[in-house]
Image (tube, rainbow, N blue to C red):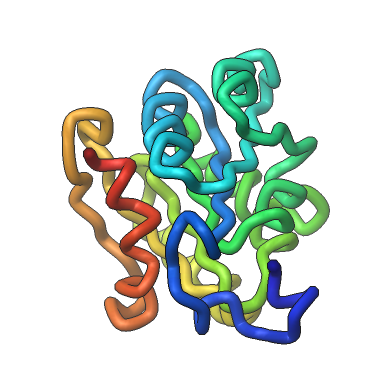
């Protein structure tokens, strides 16, 4: 359940497939693979892609299709972004009407897996701090092959509890 439904900060609960809802924005080749690992690990998954047909494979395996990044985030405790370019990161995370941060519950986590601009990561971190949602912006040179090297403007203490959600992505 989201914090809005329970009054509990989502980051205060144990992180596991039984208790944590995950969303994924960007279901291209790499996004399909990594999100598929989350499904295989048993996480409830909501997905969004500009071209909805690119999410069909995940939907056929049990994911729910959202109409926007905001709707995906509203259905999740942690949301991953894996989109093409920094401009896509900006629109999918920061747009006030459709962006993921607008829908993310307090205590939720936004993880940007896109190769992007550190200045943009700081901008997202600032916007997330205003919402009390810790951002994480890892680099992902070969996410389908193994662990991604992560860089984050948020503290390790804020993101470490969420690591069970990205372990399946790097297996």
**In the shown orientation, is residue 68 left or right of residue 166?**
right
Residue for point 61% across, 30% down:
62
Q: Position of residue 155 (x, y in %)?
A: 32, 80
Q: Position of residue 73 (x, y in %)?
A: 66, 54
The quadrant in which residue 164 appears is: bottom left
Q: Position of residue 60 (x, y in %)?
A: 62, 19
The C terminus lies in quadrant:
top left
Residue for point 63% across, 25% down:
59
Numbered marks: total: 0
The foreground one among 110 and 120 is 110
The foreground one among 87 and 51 is 51
Residue for point 77% across, 58% down:
96
Q: Vertically, is 62 above or below 92?
A: above
Q: Vertically, is 149 above or below 5?
A: above
The foreground one among 22 and 153 is 22
The quadrant in which residue 21 appears is: bottom right
The N terminus lies in quadrant:
bottom right
**In the shown orientation, is residue 53 left or right of residue 147?**
right
Residue for point 51% across, 66% down:
109
Q: Report whether residue 120 is seen.
A: no
Q: Vertically, is 115 above or below 21?
A: above
Q: Position of residue 97 (x, y in %)?
A: 82, 53
**In the shown orientation, is residue 165 left or right of residue 21?**
left
The quadrant in which residue 37 appears is: top left
Q: Report whether residue 162 is seen.
A: yes
């Amino acid at each position: 359940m989201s914090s809005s439904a329970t009054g509990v900060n989502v980051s205060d609960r144990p992180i596991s497939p039984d208790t944590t809802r995950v969303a994924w924005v960007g279901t291209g080749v790499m996004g399909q693979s990594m999100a598929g690992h989350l499904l295989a690990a048993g996480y409830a998954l909501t997905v969004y892609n500009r071209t909805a047909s690119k999410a069909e494979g995940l939907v056929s395996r049990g994911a729910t299709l959202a109409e926007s990044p905001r709707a995906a985030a509203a259905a999740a405790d942690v949301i991953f972004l894996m989109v093409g370019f920094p401009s896509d990161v900006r629109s999918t995370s920061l747009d006030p009407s459709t962006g993921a941060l607008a829908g993310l519950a307090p205590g939720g986590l936004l993880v940007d897996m896109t190769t992007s601009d550190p200045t943009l990561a700081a901008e997202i971190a600032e916007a997330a701090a205003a919402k009390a949602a810790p951002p994480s912006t890892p680099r992902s040179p070969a996410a389908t092959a193994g662990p991604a090297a992560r860089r984050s403007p948020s503290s390790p203490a804020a993101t470490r509890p969420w690591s069970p959600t990205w372990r399946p992505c790097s297996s």
